[in-house]
Image (cartoon, coloured by chain):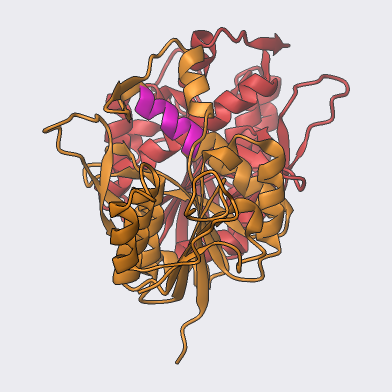
Chain colours: A red, B orange
Amino acid sequence: MAKTKLKVIKIGGNIIDNPEKLAQFLDNLANLNSPFVLIHGGGKVATEMSKSMGIESQMIQGRRVTDEATLKIVTMVYAGWINKNIVAKLQANGVNAMGLCGPDGQIVLSKKRNPEPINYGFVGDIIEVNGEKLKVLIENGFTPIIAPITSDSEGLLLNTNADTMAQAIAIGLSPYFDVELAYCFEKPGVLMDANDDNSVILNIDSTYFQELKEKGIVSDGMIPKLENALKAIAEGVEVVKIMHADNLLNPSIGTEIRK
Amino acid sequence: MAKTKLKVIKIGGNIIDNPEKLAQFLDNLANLNSPFVLIHGGGKVATEMSKSMGIESQMIQGRRVTDEATLKIVTMVYAGWINKNIVAKLQANGVNAMGLCGPDGQIVLSKKRNPEPINYGFVGDIIEVNGEKLKVLIENGFTPIIAPITSDSEGLLLNTNADTMAQAIAIGLSPYFDVELAYCFEKPGVLMDANDDNSVILNIDSTYFQELKEKGIVSDGMIPKLENALKAIAEGVEVVKIMHADNLLNPSIGTEIRK
């Protein structure tokens, strides 16, 4: 029997930070006519909140360190303020949204990252996704809206990368659904020329990714995104799309990653 | 057919503010051997957070006004930090907890309180509890842990009284379960003499409540708590207990309110 189609959609900070863009995106989600799961990042709110409380962000090699004060702030902002606002707005748009993070139903279990060689603090690496529990929620008509906060087996909350969280959840749901993972961001796809939005690469597989990487066509933030995409494909996800958030209802625009 | 027993438990700020007491309480919850729903208040964290951000609490007739900045803080603290910490700790204790607030699955719908005669700001009065959706979660093995934040039909988040929220949820679940509502606080029950913890009044009904109120034996915060209890009883809840949080596993100690 063919599995039901399910979209696992990840949105980043650039949408969260822009109230009009976010409202439009949530409106589009309500018109998607397909079951979905949304994973959202954090945006600037957490940074602004830290500043107003006089907490300085510590950075190691360009990555933020999650100390205790920062963990508290990201949990409050991601799983509290942003998550519940998205859920309330989706409910007002007729979507039966339910805001969750890792510990809720223990849908995502993680482990504090080894402090060696670099101590990133309270950062969680995912060790298990409970796709069965998410499936039960989806089959009962709930639409999970997931913040990138997880917890370990001792109940310690941990900050978790949202792109990786989306990948792991898409994989965890693939035994039950025909999953499409969509990374929505501020560009129309993976670009051949970073300065030309009309240079979208339509299809990428693992061989082509190696080539693009060696030629330096993809770099920086796009490399881990594509690695997440290829891992998802290798572990059961049907297709991954990298696309502009504005194009949610025009799925033909963007980059497709398949086996 | 007899309905399944379900406890709806409300804990207040005094437990939330005390890490050892909270840990003990969560441990007791894991040993309850009965399905339950937990509603938690906020405690001092929100006040401390406001202070550290330089936001002053505005009070009218002893009640806090929820302005926009305060709404953001209570949503972050109650639905984010406190809720997710409780959920993660309960999961570590073997309880399949799921952290929710009003907009999640639209389990509680509210309406912004009329600004006349007193404008309390972003405060929500409950207009509907969706007991059916909560029932689906409970029947699928999830234990709802609920923060007192709700939303209106437009998706506006609102601060909501946790005692009233517990009462409304207990009533909303009573068509499906044999509900016991337990208000856990820092006293062993309703006291005949406020200074004597051994003067617990074991049983109260609506007639006796009027008498206690007229004689001034119950006053201040206990009056709305008892009004909530009596409303719950009048609308389908089997029994309400007002008890010390430490006595969760000794349910014989405390005040019982029945019809």
Q: Is residue B44 above or below residue B192?
A: above
Q: Give how far across and how far down residue A149 sits, in percent.
A: 60, 37
Magenta highlight: main SS: helix
Q: Is residue A243 visible?
A: no
Q: Give how far across and how far down residue A136 sits, in percent.
A: 52, 66
**Residue that sits furthest to the left in the current view:** B116
Q: Give how far across and how far down residue B7 sits, in percent.
A: 52, 67
Figure quadrant of residue B34: bottom right
Give me the residue at 49% from left, 45% from top: B194
Q: Give how far across and how far down residue A86 sits, in percent.
A: 37, 39
Between residue A65 and residue A181, name the one nearer to us: A65
Between residue A35 and residue B166, name the one nearer to us: B166
Stretch of the chain drawn in magenta: B70-78
**Residue that sits furthest to the bottom in the current view:** B1
Figure quadrant of residue B238: bottom left
Give me the residue at 52% from left, 34% from top: B43
Let me know if residue B251 is in the magenta part. no
